[in-house]
Amino acid sequence: MARPERPPPAHPPTADDPLAFQVLNEVGIISQLSSNLAARLLAPGLNLSQFSLLNHFCRLGGERSLAQLASAMQVTKGAMTNTVARLQAKGLLAVQPDPQDGRGKRVSLTPAGRAARQQAVQQLGQGLAAIGSAVSADELAAALVGLRKLRVWFDANR
């Protein structure tokens, strides 16, 4: 079933908007739309927050405190505690007492967590394969270069 056509926005962005704003506006819209699609593709095994945390560990390795994870994911420590507890219950994260801080915890990825992340990436890859009909692999690769530079800048300036 085809989606109904949407009317044009009442006040579309114009070329007069700063270029950086235009780019981030597109990134924001893409983020919202792709997050909704990813959530549908990942369900019921993982939610997007859980996948993002597993992906964070696969990307950076090592172990982290709950405060470090909350900061990295830009959520409250309470929200991070909840996400970690759910992943720990599934055997995807390990939580150990922090030897430096008796009250603190150290969180690390388990082999099952690495496997769950890999399975999720495969699900997402299959679900996103149709992107190739809109954008070529070369265009995606070129966009990735600029997007990585933006991520590094935003990470350094938060």
Image (cartoon, rainbow, N blue to C red):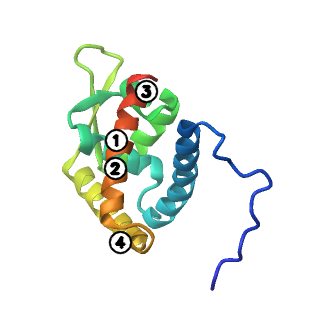
Q: CA distance from mark 4 to mark 1?
A: 23 Å
Q: Earlier in the sequence, mark 4 or mark 3?
A: 3
The answer to the question of whether label 2 and label 1 lie on touching residues, with beta carbons closer than 8 A, is yes
Front label number (3 vs 2): 2
* Left/right of residue 39 with respect to residue 136 in the rendered view: right
> Which residue matches tag 2?
144
> Is residue 93 in view?
yes
Give 89 or 58, whichever is nearer the viewer.
Answer: 58
Q: Amino acid at mark 1?
A: Arg
Give 111 or 61, whichever is nearer the viewer.
Answer: 61
Q: Position of residue 121 (x, y in %)?
A: 32, 60
Q: Position of residue 50 (x, y in %)?
A: 41, 48
* Quadrant of the image occupied by residue 72: top left
> Which residue matches tag 4?
126
Front label number (4 vs 2): 2
Query: Residue sitting at 29 percent across and 50 percent down?
Result: 91
